[in-house]
Amino acid sequence: MLIIAKFLIILYIVRTLYIGTIMDRIELGSRTAKGGFANEKDICVKFNNWKVDKEAQTWFKILGYDIEKIDFVKAIQIPVRIKKSELDKYTVNIEVYDELIRFKKADIQIKITIIIGNILKIENLSLKKANSDANYNQIDKRSVNTYQEMWRFDDDIAFWLKLFTGENNINSYPGLKTNRELRNMKRIFFDEMPDNKIKKIVRFFKKNKILVVSDLLKGRGGLSANWILVTKLNKSDNTTTWILKDINYAMNFFGGGEIKISPKGSLSIGRITMQRKGGTPDPTKLQFKIKPCDLFLEG
């Protein structure tokens, strides 16, 4: 009985410390700070000035680091396009260059050297700049064919997705059966597709939800995102509200929920919306969007 009692006491202490750590991170998770630092360059400057920058110190605590044990930090902005000759900057292998570029989601890479043992740690952050009016933010945009290569849906689903984007001109298929009168003769919305096609598409995204959400938010490979940092610049008082979350939390937050056809005829994957890109220069590509400001609601 004494052994069991000691075990329960130890378990209680460990659990209390664990919960306390989690609660500390939750309380650190969202703040409003003076000054504007909503873009990648400004965020890198703050991380590199971590010895004096209070926000950067808070970010490192959320990332799980004891700032007293950090020896050196180098934060660099990751461009949209990376030349093979520049890969050494990001500690990634040139042999996986094509996959790296295709699945890159990180906007900022932070290299942290820990004093004990001169250990090098690398953290990749995805930065989302949110508008005060909570507008959508594009998280991914590609052709239907590219998504088919990534997610392996069949040609029938690809055909209907291309009708949705307008890549397949609906006027070229006069015998096509639809659920209702079309809103636009240049494309077809999900709720206008035959019921069996709607069910097939929804079923595919339900079955492959984890893969889809991971590719959209986290990515794959050496430049996938470990964390997501959402910043909202408040121009009226020159402050920035920010929230920093583990990417797995963000995937569960934005990707959690029902997969269904939205009232406007698009596809909803939890809080992620699939739409046709429209406009120039990619009018017939698929795009996926989120409202980054929603993350502030959870805190």
Image (spheres, grey):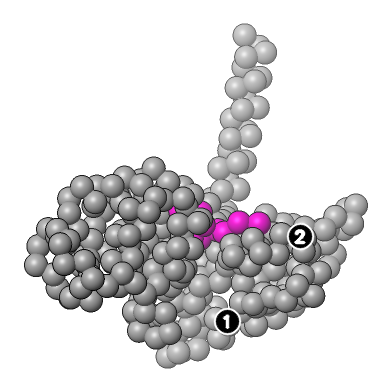
User: Does dot 1 land on a helix, a strand or a loop?
Assistant: loop
Q: Is residue 208 above or below residue 244?
A: above
The three-letter amino acid code for the residue at tag 1 is Asn
Q: What residue is drawn where x is 74% and y is 57%?
A: 66
Residue ID for mark 2: 95
Image-based side of 61 in relation to 218, left or right:
right
215 in the magenta segment? yes
Q: What residue is drawn where x is 13% and y is 70%?
A: 182
Q: Which residues are magenta?
A: 212-221
User: Does dot 2 land on a helix, a strand or a loop?
Assistant: helix
Residue 87 got which mark?
none
**Which x, y percent locates residue 186?**
23, 76
Give the farthest residue toward the top: 1
The nearer-to-camera label among 2 and 1 is 2
Q: Is residue 237 above or below residue 87?
A: below
Q: Residues within 10 Å of mark 1 (few under 14, many from 20)?
A: some
**Which x, y percent locates residue 266?**
26, 64
Quarter that holds the N terminus: top right
The three-letter amino acid code for the residue at tag 2 is Glu
Residue 66 in view (yes/no): yes
Q: What residue is drawn where x is 44% and y is 68%?
A: 143
Q: How many marks?
A: 2
Residue 39 got which mark?
1
**Which x, y percent locates residue 129?**
49, 77
Residue 53 in view (yes/no): no
245 in the magenta segment? no
Q: Is residue 15 above or below residue 283?
A: above
Q: Main secondary structure of the magenta part?
A: helix
Quarter that holds the C terminus: bottom left
Residue 135's quadrant in the figure? bottom left
**Which x, y percent locates residue 52?**
74, 77
Image-based side of 231 in relation to 166, left or right:
right
